[in-house]
């Protein structure tokens, strides 16, 4: 009887997740333009992709963005968590809600907001730089060949650090205070307490945050497409953008499918590695 | 339905579109299109040749890419509306010297940069060769006149004619900023005319970029989206009647009343809106001289993304004119070789 409850979600999952996934894998072995007949080409799409400079550069850009989407938010989240837990901060719930807001705003809206922020002639960022007397720091941010990628990265950090902070704050509250007392008695200061008690205690939360951040960083099509289309030139192109272009603009559906499969493989591998780190060597709980 | 290899070619190849030659003969549709536009609606029956014999769509509106100008700023500089290519370049210099932004540009979305390229290419290269190239002649994109066009853009970029921030400004913001008085010239399509006309009233005009060789102006021009009849439809005659209606004279009248450009050549029609009058005048000149040229990115699917990106780099001085030409040529030749 219990299985009946599962049938509907299972059907949904089959139709909208499994079936497209398997079809994509199938298409990746064909030369297919989306409309006419497909020709079997085996692994040629994959070989071409791995040898294609444009694709390799987009992978490089995605790796750079990971620093902004994963490393920075986790670091900031840890710092914030260390700062506001075990301390009474007035209005901490308000802070938490506000800092978490980017997670609930639609990506397209985020793109529009930041496009305005980065607008070179009248946008707030350049205006503020001028007001501070830092005119030489003004840039056409999203159109700057050196700063466009970091500019997008900053948006990633802004989006993710609230989530990391919330995860870590709730995680720290589960660490027994007796541990902190113990290290204090051993003469450790705040920093050593952080390294030896907080960090290990947050291992699970860090791996969860890491996974989510990494995946978000690889799935930022809406941001890149709406802000720069991969430009200026190809400076902000990322694999998911290339998948879109190949599938819908240049009619290389087979190649797009191969690229998608590669992205999924990378994500699965990285997630597995991260989850391995989760296995605690010594569990305080 | 978008033209050339952006969409139409694929659908013709799958047999999804009804060939319209018979209906065109019956209703006289070919008389409704300026000569240069017929090819844009056409493919060969097997869908391999863009610009072939079979008509596949009709459209009711037109558009072209030209040079908008701020009338009061030109006057303040003591200049007339440029009537030759050299006068345009001189005006750009004068504007820069006077501290104005010579050419407003916003190319964040990449495709607007392609339009800047096309405008200069059409002013310098031979129109027939440009058209043949887009329709699949397979000729090389690396020609002396294209190189000259690329050099011109590179030079304008490096001397600050586009300003400093153009690569980071979106085209919509550029339109708004031009409307607010930033920039003497603005190279973009007539699809922005309503916004500019509402904001600037009498103060804005537009002209097709004059040719370097002082021949009749050539510009990127096309119908608005084309309407085709699906082959599977059970109501071909009815659909054809509808196409006839929306592309006919009454429809053209209504479009003009609404401030839009109808695709029918406009003979001696009076309009109050000065910008619309300029647009009609430019369209008529292009129609009479058969110098309406298709959008360059219709020539091959990769160009849809690459032309904008490469043009952005050219304007910003991040790629040399030679490399720009080579990149476009390689995308084009790869596509030609495959099909």
Image (cartoon, coloured by chain):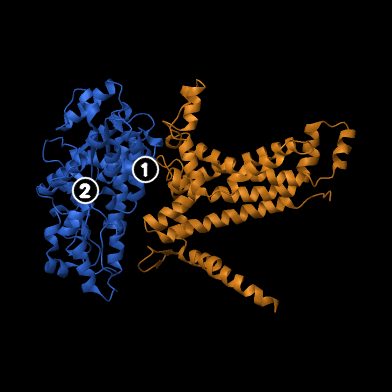
Q: Is residue A115 left or right of residue B21?
A: right
- Residue at image position (75%, 46%) is A171
**Residue B46 horizontal/vertical position (percent):** 24, 67
Q: Tell me the element at label 1.
A: loop
**Residue A112 horizontal/vertical position (percent):** 47, 43
**Residue A110 horizontal/vertical position (percent):** 51, 44
- Residue at image position (36%, 43%) is B110
Say if labels 1 and 2 share a chain.
Answer: yes
Q: Is residue B320 left or right of residue A109?
A: left
Q: Is residue B55 visible?
A: no
Above or below, comparing residue B218 to residue B155 in the picture: below
Residue A33: numbered disc: none
Residue B110: numbered disc: 1
- Residue at image position (49%, 44%) is A111
Q: Colour of chain B?
A: blue
Seen from the viewer's position, the closer of residues B280 and A125 is B280
Q: Residue A185 appears in which quarter of the rendering?
A: top right
Write down the residue under mark 2: B221
Seen from the viewer's position, the closer of residues A154 and B298 is A154
Q: Colour of chain A?
A: orange
Pair 1/2: label in front = 2
Q: Is residue B274 visible?
A: yes
Above or below, comparing residue A159 to residue B158 in the picture: below
Q: Residue B59 appears in which quarter of the rendering?
A: bottom left
Q: Residue B94 appears in which quarter of the rendering?
A: top left
Chain identity of mark 2: B
């Amino acid at each position: 009887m219990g299985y009946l409850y599962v049938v509907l979600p299972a059907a949904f999952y089959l139709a909208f997740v499994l079936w497209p996934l398997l079809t994509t894998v199938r298409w990746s072995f064909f030369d297919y333009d989306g409309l006419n007949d497909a020709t079997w080409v085996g692994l040629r799409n994959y070989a071409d992709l791995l040898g294609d400079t444009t694709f390799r550069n987009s992978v490089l850009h995605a790796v750079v963005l990971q620093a902004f989407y994963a490393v920075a938010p986790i670091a900031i989240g840890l710092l914030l968590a260390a700062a506001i837990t075990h301390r009474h901060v007035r209005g901490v719930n308000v802070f938490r809600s506000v800092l978490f807001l980017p997670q609930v705003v639609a990506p397209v809206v985020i793109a529009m907001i930041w496009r305005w922020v980065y607008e070179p002639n009248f946008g707030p960022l350049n205006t503020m730089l001028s007001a501070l007397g830092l005119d030489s720091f003004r840039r056409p941010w999203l159109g700057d060949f050196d700063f466009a990628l970091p500019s997008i990265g900053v948006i990633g950090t802004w989006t993710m650090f609230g989530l990391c902070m919330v995860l870590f704050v709730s995680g720290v509250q589960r660490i027994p205070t007796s541990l902190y007392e113990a290290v204090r008695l051993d003469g450790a200061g705040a920093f050593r307490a952080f390294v030896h008690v907080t960090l290990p205690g947050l291992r699970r939360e860090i791996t969860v945050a890491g996974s989510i951040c990494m995946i978000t960083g690889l799935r930022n099509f809406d941001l890149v497409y709406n802000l720069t289309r991969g430009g200026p030139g190809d400076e902000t192109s990322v694999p998911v953008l290339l998948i879109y272009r190949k599938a819908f603009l240049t009619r290389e559906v087979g190649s797009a499918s191969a690229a998608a499969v590669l992205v999924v493989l990378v994500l699965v591998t990285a997630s597995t590695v991260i989850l391995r780190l989760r296995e605690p060597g010594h569990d305080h709980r | 339905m978008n033209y050339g290899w952006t969409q139409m070619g694929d659908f013709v190849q799958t047999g999804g579109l009804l060939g319209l030659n018979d209906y065109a003969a019956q209703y006289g549709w070919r008389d409704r299109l300026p000569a240069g536009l017929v090819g844009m609606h056409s493919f060969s029956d097997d869908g391999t040749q863009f610009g072939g014999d079979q008509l596949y769509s009709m459209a009711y509106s037109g558009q072209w890419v030209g040079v908008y100008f701020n009338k009061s700023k030109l006057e303040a500089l003591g200049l007339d509306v440029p009537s030759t290519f050299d006068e345009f370049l001189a005006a750009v210099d004068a504007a820069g010297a006077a501290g104005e932004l010579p050419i407003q540009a916003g190319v964040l979305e990449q495709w607007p940069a392609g339009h800047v390229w096309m405008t200069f290419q059409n002013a310098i290269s031979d129109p027939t060769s440009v058209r043949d190239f887009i329709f699949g002649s397979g000729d090389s994109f690396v020609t002396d006149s294209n190189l000259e066009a690329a050099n011109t853009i590179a030079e304008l970029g490096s001397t600050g004619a586009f300003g400093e921030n153009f690569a980071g400004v979106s085209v919509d913001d550029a339109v708004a900023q031009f409307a607010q008085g930033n920039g003497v010239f603005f190279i973009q399509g007539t699809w922005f005319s309503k916004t500019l006309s509402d904001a600037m009233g009498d103060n804005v005009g537009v002209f097709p970029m004059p040719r370097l060789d002082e021949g009749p102006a050539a510009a990127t021009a096309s119908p608005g989206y084309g309407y085709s009849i699906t082959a599977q439809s059970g109501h071909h005659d009815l659909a054809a009647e509808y196409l006839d209606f929306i592309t006919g004279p009454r429809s053209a009248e209504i479009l003009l009343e609404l401030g839009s450009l109808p695709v029918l050549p406009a003979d001696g029609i009076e309009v109050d809106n000065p910008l619309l009058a300029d647009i009609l005048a430019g369209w008529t000149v292009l129609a009479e001289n058969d110098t309406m040229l298709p959008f360059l990115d219709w020539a091959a699917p990769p160009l849809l993304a690459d032309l904008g990106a490469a043009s952005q780099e050219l304007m910003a001085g991040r790629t040399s004119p030679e490399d720009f030409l080579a990149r476009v040529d390689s995308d084009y030749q790869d596509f030609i070789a495959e099909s």
